[in-house]
Amino acid sequence: MNSSIRKYQSIDLMFWSILLFVFEFIVVKAGFVWFSNQLWTLSIVPALTAIVYMRWGIYGVFYSVIGGIAICFASGANNQQYLIYCLGNMFSVVLFLMEKLIGKEKIRESVLASIVFGLVSALSMQIGRGVVSALFGNGFDMIVSFIATDIISTLFAVIIVWIARKLDGVFEDQISYLVRVNNEEKDKGGRE
C-alpha cells in the first residue's frame, strides 16, 4: 500500500472513530435524559461498525470496541461492564468471516446480503455481550436480554446499512472504490 493510500486510510479510520464515539455518546446520554424509564436502548455502533468492516475489513473489530467504550463511558459503567461491552462487541468479527466467505462486492450489491450484514453486525455484538456477561456469572439468559433491549439498535443497523449501500463509496471496500474512481477519471480524461 503506498503512502497516499495509507494516509487516506488513517484519515478515514480517524473520521469514523470520531463519528462513532461522538454520536454514540450523544445517543446514550440522550437516552438516559429523555427515555430513562424505557426498557430498550439505541446504539449506532452496529451500523457504523458494519460500514467500517465493509470499508476496511478487519479494522471493524476495533470500531466495535471503540463503540463499547463509548457506551460505557457515556453511561458511567463499571469495569465489568466495560469488559462485557468491549469483549462482547468483538464478536462482530463474524462480519469479517462473512466478507471472506461471500465477498464484499456481493454483500454490497445484494440488498438481502446487505440487510443480513447489518443484522449480523447487531446480533453478533448482542450475543457476544451476553456470552461475556454469562462468563461473569450472570447466566446465559443475558443473551436474550441484550437482544431484546437492543432490538431498536438492530433495526437501526439494518436501515443505516441499507441506506449506506445506496451512497456512492460509503458501503464499499475503499481500495476498490479508489481504483474505480481513478479509472472513471481516466475514462473521462480520455474522452475529452
Image (tube, rainbow, N blue to C red):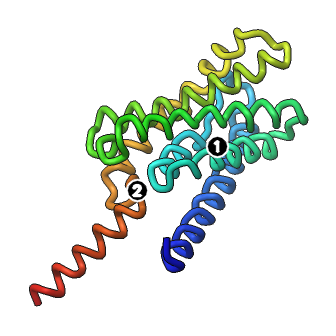
Work out whether residue 185 or residue 119 is closer to the camera in this orientation and state it.
185
Q: Secondary structure at mark 2?
A: loop
Q: Residue at x 60, y 18 (%)?
A: 148
35 shown above or below 161? above
From the image, tell me which residue sits under label 1: 64
Q: Residue at x 57, y 28 (%)?
A: 124
Q: On the picture, is 149 further left or further right than 173?
A: right
From the image, tell me which residue sits under label 2: 173
Q: Secondary structure at mark 1?
A: helix
Kindly give the residue lying farthest to the left in the view shown. 191
Q: Quadrant of residue 136?
A: top right
Q: On the picture, is 158 further left or further right than 191?
A: right
7 shown above or below 172? below
Please, what is the three-letter code of the amino acid marked with disc 1? Ser
Whether residue 38 is visible to the viewer of this picture, yes or no, is yes
| Mark 1 or mark 2: whose residue is earlier in sequence | 1
- Percent of width and height locating residue 138: 82, 13
- Percent of width and height locating residue 47: 51, 43
Q: Which one is in front in this view, the residue at disc 1 or the one at disc 2? A: 2
Q: Residue at x 74, y 47 (%)?
A: 70
Work out whether residue 147 or residue 173 is closer to the camera in this orientation and state it.
173
Q: Quadrant of residue 115?
A: top left
